[in-house]
Image (spheres, helix red, strand yellow):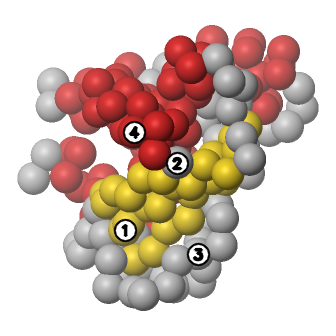
Amino acid sequence: MNFLEECLTLGDWLSQENRRALYKYFLRSNNGNYKSQANLLVTNGLLNKTIANGQIYYLVKDGLVNYSTRRLDSDEFTPVIREIKLTGIKFYDIIRLKKFFAQSDVDVIRNFPLPGLNPQSDSGFGINVYPYYDLNYYSDGKGKLLGLVNRIKTNDRELLNKLKGR
């Protein structure tokens, strides 16, 4: 089993560093898929997809994109997990939506992983307050400038290479 396959089974057991690297990996490796999905979402106003053991439902309403999710064996979706506002500038919205998709994929893997060796809790849906695409994530809400400095200092190269299978 490679590291990416292992990450899909770890769920709650994924470290913050592994989740951030997974986000960056998805953003790079799924760029084309995310672009197609973003175009479909903007055109149709909704999009469904699955990852790990979860289904994600994206909806565009009044210029906002949000997503809800559910475990594949469940009938009930969560309340809205995250949302972003569209700007109306399509190329810019596509870039933002790709980041939003990568974040939602990581959120779902964290909460609805594939079956594996580690027991998973059913204590609710866990997410980071600040998504990885927000500079506030890197400063823990203490400002975007500090977040930029900390993001520049962050080195995920080793984990990214591990995800790529190198």
**Where does label 1 land, which residue?**
54
Q: Residues within 10 Å of mark 2 (few under 14, many from 20)?
A: some
Q: Which kind of residue does numbered mark 2 sit on?
A: Gly
Q: Nearer the viewer, residue 161 or 53?
A: 53
Residue at the spot 74% in from the left edge and 47% down from the top edge: 62
Q: CA distance from mark 1 to mark 4?
A: 20 Å
Q: Nearer the viewer, mark 1 or mark 2?
A: 2
Q: Is residue 57 left or right of residue 89?
A: left
- Return the residue at label 2: 45
Q: Reply above or below: 145 against 166.
A: above
**Farthest residue, direction front:** 44
Q: CA distance from mark 4 to mark 2?
A: 8 Å
Give me the C-alpha separation between circle 4 and circle 3.
22 Å
Secondary structure state at the residue bearing disc 3? loop
- In percent of width and height, residue 87 lies at 72, 25
Mark 1–mark 3 Cα distance, whole angstroms, equals 11 Å
The residue type indicated by label 3 comes to Thr
**Crowding near the residue tagged with mark 4, few <14, some 14–19, many ≥20 C-alpha atoms within 10 Å:** few
Which of the two labelled residues, at mark 4 and mark 2, occupies the earlier sequence position? Answer: 4
Q: Which mark is residue 78?
A: 3
Residue at mark 4: 40
Residue 75: name its quadrant.
bottom left
